Amino acid sequence: MTLSLNCKDAGDPVCTHTMYGENEEELLQNAKKHGIEVHGYTEETWNDEIAKNKDHFRKLIKTT
Ligand SMILES: [Zn+2]
């Protein structure tokens, strides 16, 4: 089972990068890495974002 989350679905207007993970924890780790590398988040602002929007992100995760 692979979980995936698309950046555009998560609300980014231009980025169509898809993140994958074997489980939610791994997916969120990959999303964090992408958020920091590509979207200018820092460890701290990312954690804030996740804390505020975790339910929102969860709903966007697709299972394949
Ligand atoms: Zn992105």
Image: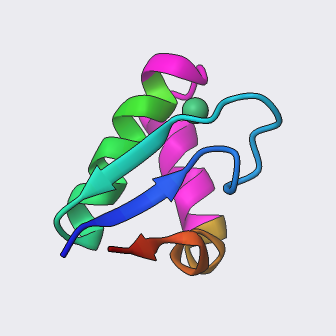
Q: Quadrant of residue 63?
A: bottom left
* Rendered-image quarter of ligand 1: top right
Q: Is residue 23 above or below residue 18?
A: below
* Image quarter (top left, top right, bottom left or bottom right) of the N terminus: bottom left
Q: Which residue appears at 54% of the width and 60% of the height?
A: 50
* Direction from residue 63 to residue 14 in the image, left or right: right
Magenta stretch? 37-52
What percent of the width, then of the height, locates residue 62?
46, 73
Of residues 54 and 18, the one nearer the viewer is 18
Q: Is residue 8 above or below residue 13?
A: below
Q: Residue 43 colored magenta?
A: yes
Q: Which residue appears at 31% of the width and 43% of the height?
A: 30
Number of numbered labels in the structure image: 0
Q: Which residue appears at 56% of the width and 28% of the height?
A: 41
Q: Main secondary structure of the magenta part?
A: helix
Q: Farthest residue in the front direction?
A: 64
Of residues 63 and 25, the one nearer the viewer is 63
What percent of the width, then of the height, locates residue 45?
57, 39
Q: Is residue 26 above or below residue 38?
A: below
Q: Residue 40 colored magenta?
A: yes
What percent of the width, then of the height, locates residue 18?
46, 43
